[in-house]
Image (cartoon, coloured by chain):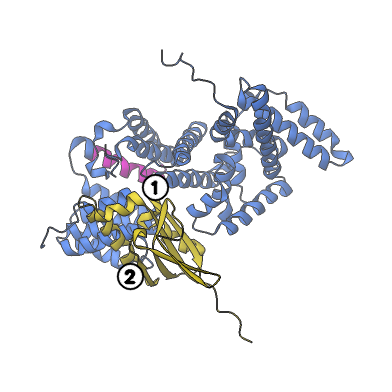
Amino acid sequence: MERARRPPPAPPSAAAEQAARASYGRLLALVSARTRDIAAAEDALAEAFAAALAQWGEQGVPANPEGWLLTVARRAAGHQSARAATASRVGDVLALLAEEREDVSASPFGDERLALLFVCAHPAIDPDAQAPLMLQTVLGLDAARIAAAFLVSGATMGQRLVRAKRKIRDAGIAFVVPDVEEAPQRLAAVLSAIYAAYGTAWDDTLGADARLAGLRGEALFLARLTAELMPEQAEAMGLLSLICHCEARQPARRGADGAFVPLHAQDPQMWSRELVLEAEGALRRAAELGAPGRFQTEAAIQSLHAHQRMTGERFTAPLARLYDVLAGFAPTTGVMVARAVAHAENGAWAAALGQLRAMEGTASYQPWWAALARVSWLAGDAQGAADAAARAAGLSADPAIRAFLLGGGYRLQAGG
Amino acid sequence: MQYVLLYHETAEERAKGHDPEAAGAYWGGWMAYMGAMSQAGVMQGGNGLDGPETATTLRIENGTRHVVDGPFADTKEAFGGYAVIEVPDLDTALEWAARAPCAVAGSVEIRPVMPPPPVG
């Protein structure tokens, strides 16, 4: 049996690293739920990891590394607050230490990470800091990578995160999932952060970065958790559907030679059947709730793409319409570019060219040039397509996508 | 701000430029990258260099010239070229550095251009 075979014991540093990668967010959520101070919880967790590196080498890796880390981190957090406490707060600290003995799995939310997500989405927190804060605390991403994902400098992001954590501590924001009335607004921020986390990992088409592959799993986990705990929220279902559709295609995005394979050339047999079914189920449940939104529309688009590939039928007209709907919900540069391509695929390439040319600030925006290449190609302008594809290739940091744009269908025939 | 991007390549990556099988993709990638930089208006100048096997190094010690065949330091990645770019900040410079074909088969060093020394 595959399950019964145990892996050889990992060296202590590898075991600590594994625990850090797999459970950082969960551990931080559990510790900070007691302390209500994310920065202090991070310090306590750092102490626990340092202790693990020192002790596991001498005494061996404990049977339950995560439980060990949690106990040590909570003790460290207890010491910190005991040091900081005034006489009147000693009672709180004692209560806190008593709570440590509670069973970890007895949380009413199933997972403390969801409560931590909602804390980060509290209206008292600077909106610009909400999503980055979730990525850092719940998923354990470092500030530099978050800064890259949100297109600001590392220093700016670092300050933003520190300010937000101070605010949570000083304002005494409760570590609970909010009431039903208050939930939808904060849910939107939670969903955006999960979406951003998945998007960051998705861009790594080569799957070269193991941490990003882990991030995809974390984002999927959080999307499932949010949908499970808030089954009446159509957008939570929509996001789950969207992420499942994208994740289902992951095995088909690279050819045997490692080359990037675009959706229209993928083999649907390589898609994960379970994830496609999960995606379709979530989208159906969302539709029954009768509250359309951005993520449901994106999921519907991905669903149509999947059906198109599986049945061979073309759904270009409904796809173009769905992109119009999506542009109404979220008129971002990325959506407007994708909408133009959808219209071109539906035969309206002149209108699509007009839409693309009407956009501003796209001189160094890679997707715009890739879209121009596709639309020019559909319009029969081979030279224009090749030029735009070369520009898009020059703007891409991904060798697989660069090779596709330069060597793919856009290359002019010799002498052409 | 002005930055210089210093491109370093591994020997295997550099060899692609002379391999009939790989040369098209290799030079195509660099042409597209340099083209995108100049069309975006950030490119101030730059050059690709012949291989490290063509290098000659000179130093003067106690008035004697020492001329050696080969680069200053023989390393796994060899310096292969540079570009001078004008961009608002380091983050933008990093973005352009990440797009260089050698970013995944070597490295790119980013250095701010030193401002002129104060006069007087």
Q: Residue visible at 28% across and 63% down?
A: B31
User: Residue A391, how many percent across, how many down?
Assistant: 29, 62
Write down which chain is painted yellow. B
- A408 vs B113, left or right, is left
| Local SS, label 1 | loop
What are the residue bounds of the magenta stretch?
Answer: A291-308
Judging depth in this view, the residue of B115 and A245 nearest the camera is: B115
Using the image, determine if residue A338 lies above or below residue A26: below
Q: x%, y% of residue A11?
A: 57, 27
Q: Examine the structure image and report whether residue A292 is included in the region drawn in magenta.
A: yes
SS for callout 2: helix
B47 lies above or below A31: below
Crowd band around label 1 with a 10 angstrom C-alpha radius: few (<14), some (14–19), many (20+):
few
Which color is chain A depicted in?
blue
What residue lies at 22% left-to-right and 49% top-to-bottom? A317
- Say yes or no: labels 2 and 1 on the same chain: no
Marks 2/1: CA–CA distance: 24 Å
The residue carrying mark 1 is: A203
Q: Chain of mark 1?
A: A
Frontmost residue, A339 versus A294: A339
Quadrant holding the C terminus of chain A: bottom left
